[in-house]
Image (spheres, grey):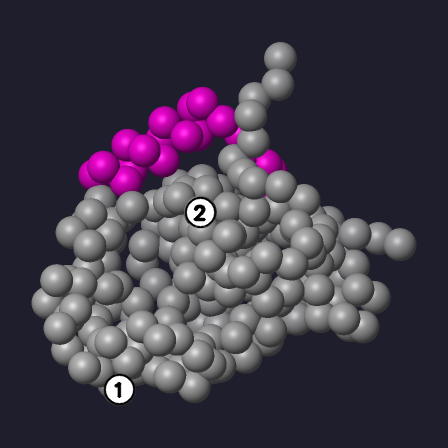
Amino acid sequence: MKAYRIHFIRHALTEANEAGRYCGVTETSVSAKGRRELMEKMTEFVYPPVDKVYVSPLKRCIETAAFIYPEGYARVMPELREMNFGDFEGKLITELHDLPEYKKFLKGGLDNPPPNGESLRSVVTRCVEAVDFIIKDMMQSGYESAAVVTHGGIIMNMMGCFGLPKYPPNEYACDFGEGFTVLATAQMWQQSGSFEVAGMLPYQKTE
């Protein structure tokens, strides 16, 4: 049975990330430090070649995708955007930690969104839609490999919800410019809504 190789990659570091700000749907570019770090990773490690690139519509992901795959055939997918943190967008944790609504949000749960923000249930729903579209698009187009350039939170939720072996989402946290390779078959996805996590990336160079 044919397996499709999908590489989920977190965007490069931004100034908002450096400052420790909540940055969900707020637009922010990759920082100078982020570009340097990504260039170092591309020199020291290997990002696998792909047939197609799927990317979040947010600037930091589009910039990262263009950097790693400058000639990649890319499709922008709104479903791959980061969680909307509502009233917490752009705020530092130190500005929020004493607020009752922030303490409530930190308790977690599928239906516990930040004020004027997005629930985790909504995020998981669109993650299902995104993976379903990507696998079907790869099948119909004859693609064998693809890169998905998105956000840390999205990757953690995708791996935690759909990845095998099963681990909590925070076990799938990854650094900027890093991520996971998964192997997906149409049958596994359609029957159990899952894929196999094959390893982390970028890869070590081989002699």
Q: Amino acid at mark 2?
A: Cys
Q: Is residue 113 left or right of residue 167?
A: left
Q: Main secondary structure of the magenta part?
A: helix
Residue stretch rendered in magenta on the structure: 32-50
Q: Say which residue appears at 39% left-offset and 75% top-offset.
A: 108
Numbered circles on residues, count: 2
Residue 154 x, y percent position in the rendering: 46, 63
Viewer can see residue 138:
no
Q: Say which residue appears at 21% left-offset and 71% top-offset.
A: 89
Residue 70 x, y percent position in the rendering: 45, 42
Tell me where residue 194 sits by quadrant.
bottom right
Q: Say which residue appears at 25% left-offset and 85% top-offset.
A: 115
Tell me where residue 93 sits by quadrant.
bottom left
Residue bearing mark 1: 116
Q: Quarter of the image for the C terminus: give it.
A: top right
The answer to whether residue 40 is magenta is: yes
Q: Amino acid at mark 1?
A: Asn
**Name of the residue lying farthest toward the top:** 207
For residue 57, which numbered disc appears in the image? none
Q: Is residue 24 above or below residue 71?
A: below
For residue 174, which numbered disc appears in the image? 2
Q: Quarter of the image for the N terminus: give it.
A: bottom right
The answer to whether residue 21 is magenta is: no
Tell me where residue 37 sits by quadrant.
top left
* Secondary structure of the residue carrying numbered label 2: loop
* Secondary structure of the residue carrying numbered label 1: loop
First in sequence: mark 2 vs mark 1: 1
The residue nearer to you, when weighing 49 against 91, is 91
Q: Is residue 201 left or right of residue 15?
A: right
Viewer can see residue 90:
yes
